[in-house]
Amino acid sequence: MGGESTAVTRAVVVPLDVSPSEERLLRSYCGARRFAYNWVVSTVLENLAVRRGERAAGVAEESLTPALSWSFQSFDRRWHQVRDEVAPWWREVSMHAFRSGIRDATAGLKNWSDWKAGKRKGPKVEFPKWKKKGRSTLSVSFVEINHQLSWLHPSRHHVRLMLPKSTPDPQVRRRRDRLGWLHTTESTAPLWRAVESGEATIQKVTISRRGGRWQASFQLRYKKPPAQRPVRHRGGLIGVDAGVRHLVTTSEPVPGLTDADGHVANPKVLDGNLRRLQRLDRAVSRAQRGSKNHRKLVRRRARLHGRVAMTRALHIHAVTTTLAGAFDTVAVETLNVKGMANKKRRLGRKLADAGLGELRRQLAYKTADRDHQLVPVGRAFPSSKTCSVCGHAKAKLALSERVFRCDHCGHVADRDVNAARTIANEAARLLGKQQHEQDQTDTSPSYDRETLNADRRPRKTREAKADLAAVA
């Protein structure tokens, strides 16, 4: 579609294969991060409570307890002053673990403050809450910009773990030196080449436990969008209708992706493993909390959840990569997935199993990386009720009616296929309107007067004729 390439931020996830001793060290790092996060939140809440009580007692505003600065630098300095008192064991883990918790907490406070002040758009942002042990995600982040390749081992199968600078016991120090490299199950050679050549810069490394397994996520800043997997280019515009019955329905069949009608099957991974998850949930609830059997069942359940999530993600990646690479323009309907999920419990579970939000997110960045275009069609547009041939919109269309029959021209088609074609038609109209307005702006970009309906447009409006003025 043309356009200059710009720097983009992408994540590269590498699965880890850690030993029991390495896992204990990682859990201590994640616990230190959680402790620092909770310390920031509790410090802010105490300060707010003290100031609130002083105001209630009638203390003058200038005599109130000074308000705390919520910046990372302020809390980092404060932590170095009180760490011997609040966490005497701080030397046992790396200082970067505490900084990770402080950084996350201050970012959450800033997001909440910006939302309260109206500077942040989007859904409501809650005040940061305490992270409970055993319930929050085990995660810790490390930031080091100066030594990029120091994160990766020359063997291409290890990721560096930052160790404590000093420990009282030299024997502990020597033992932990052997834990400085975490083995990866996948090669890091592509990541090494991108960093070594200067194409990408590692901004942050996050080690977390998700789906019952440890993983390292590298946040990379590419100078230009990274090379994508080659896909047969077909060109043109395609409309995409996402749903639950069929994960994706396209306005035209795509060989190798859809069937003859343009449908892509919904794998329904969660639905297929729901019975196993229910049995594991019952077993976990019956086991004694803290016992070996309870921990074993929790690990089994976490691995099953991870397998479900990974299977779903791989299927969506295959679909979005083909659509974003094969067509110059992809039109997709903007869905309020969260609002739809809140209406009915079972519908919400089916929507979560389909991953419609993830589908839209992947289409957005994959089309941008390939310099293609994603055209969102507003959620208010009645794509299912509008005929793709004549454009006539029906007043009502029940969800149980899977075949669309137009009352105006008699067109009959599958409900989802008709919706996908209607989305493609609407995207073509929006693109044509945008191009027309751009052409008009380029030829005459002045705003001299208003039109008859008081709609200011990026072009000069000729004087209204007498008969048109009389009709108006």
Image (cartoon, grey):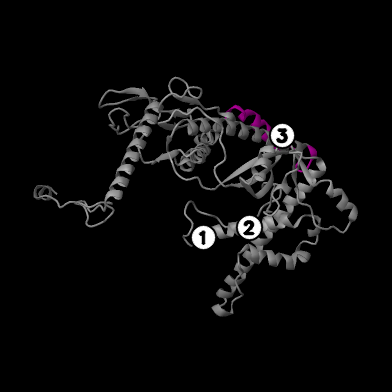
Marks 2 and 1, the one that precedes in the sequence: 2
Bounds of the magenta span?
Answer: 271-292
Which residue is found at the position 55% from the left and 28% from the top?
Answer: 268
Q: Amino acid at mark 1?
A: Asp
Q: Which residue is mark 2?
A: 105
Q: Are marks 1 and 3 in contact (CB under 8 Å)?
A: no
Q: Amino acid at mark 2?
A: Ala
Q: Which residue is mark 1?
A: 114
* Left or right of residue 287, residue 44 in this image: left
Residue 300 numbered tag: 3
Q: Amino acid at mark 3?
A: Arg
Marks 2 and 3, the one that precedes in the sequence: 2
Residue 420 seen anywhere in this rendered image of the structure? yes
Measured along the vertical axis of the image, is residue 94 above or below residue 373? below
| Residue lying at the far front of the rendered structure | 197
Is 85 contained in the magenta span?
A: no
Label 1 crowd (10 A; few <14 / some 14-19 / many >=20): some
Residue 400 seen anywhere in this rendered image of the structure? no
